Amino acid sequence: MEEQSNFPHWDELIPDALGLIFNNLSLQEVLTVIPSVCKSWRKAATGPYCWQEIDIEEWSNGCQPDNLDKMLRMLITQSSGSLRKLCVSGLQNDTIFSFITENAGSLQALRLRRSEMSDSIVEQTAGRLSTITFLDLSYCGKVGARALEAIGKHCKLLVTLCRNMHPLDAAGKLSQDDEANAIAATMPRLKRLEMAYHLISKGSVLNILSGCPQLEFLDLRGCWDVKLDNQFLKEKFTKLKVLGPHVMDYYEMDEWAYCSDYSDSSEYLAWELEMGDYDDYDIYDEMWHDERGLEELELRFYEGIDEDAGMFGWPLSP
């Protein structure tokens, strides 16, 4: 018994340790359940420890754009400049992208699939993304060669670029060789490049292989005009693995149909929490499922810790 008493209570763990533990919970649980347990847990949940890695990609697939902007601003602000990883889908404007880059001083991995930021805003803000090593701009129809060139010039640590597209995105375009050539000219440290379903030529792919000598994986699924000699690849690029272009693949079609538009239904938000008889959490659950509630959740999330925490219904730490 004496030995067991030497172990610290959960509420006595340091905030960064609690943050690592809370990262295994769902977004809804961290925002609405954890802060109501005790003061020390609330402090961890509202501090930067929980928000060094923010992955709301699944949640963002089904939410309204305004709610997505509010959630991103709230969580990124809470990271207090320590954000290392951000995964989100469906940014709808340049303003929220600019806000992300303003808080990207420590950012290493950025996934922004199906987002609507423009070439011009990426050109203006790429200098703020100089620390990233991983970037996913798949299915982002408004960015092109200009944005990729700016990223390549400023993001010298970049080793992975995902720039996959849907077959329908190529409709009406004659060529996307300018994107391939921008990558070849500015991203020499790339080790992994994904360019599925681009209208690119064999020549532009050879430019990539020449300009990116450290490349280990190249995804060319659906790049039907690219015909590379396997023997040539084996002799000249011994470490390189090429996927495609002729691959039987239905993944993109299914995924696009599932995610191309946000849904008004709440099925993506309706995480089932098994909380037994904890009726006090009902108010937080209501907040989670409507726009007004999100504003109230944001207000509570930003409130500081004080000695009168009991007035909010939180148990005091022992």
Image (tube, grey):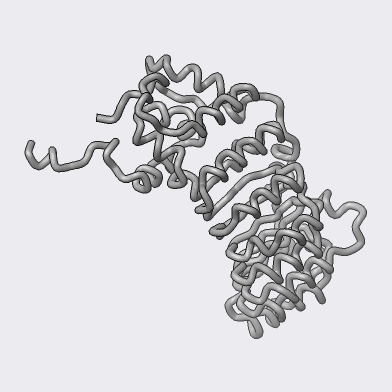
Image quarter where the C terminus lies is: top left
Q: Residue at horizontal 76%, vertical 73%? A: 205
Q: Is 127 on the left or on the right of 284, as rendered? A: right
Which quadrant would residue 9 be assigned to in this image?
top left
Toward the viewer: 159 or 49?
A: 49
Which quadrant would residue 59 be assigned to in this image?
top right
Q: Is 2 on the left or on the right of 294, as rendered? A: left
Q: Which residue, as the protein is rendered here, is positioned at the far front?
A: 307
Toward the viewer: 234 or 217?
A: 217
Q: Which residue, as the protein is rendered here, is positioned at the far bottom?
A: 235
Q: Is 42 on the left or on the right of 207, as rendered? A: left
Toward the viewer: 3 or 250?
A: 3
Q: Which residue, as the protein is rendered here, is positioned at the far left?
A: 2
Q: Give above or below for 232 relative to 292.
A: below
Rendering coords of residue 127 (x, y %): 68, 64
Rendering coords of residue 40 (x, y %): 34, 36
Q: Residue at horizontal 68%, vertical 47%? A: 251
Q: Residue at horizontal 43%, vertical 46%? A: 49
**Number of dots carrying numbers:** 0
Image quarter where the N terminus lies is: top left
Rendering coords of residue 22 (x, y %): 41, 40
Toward the viewer: 302 or 31?
A: 302
Q: Residue at horizontal 49%, vertical 45%? A: 51
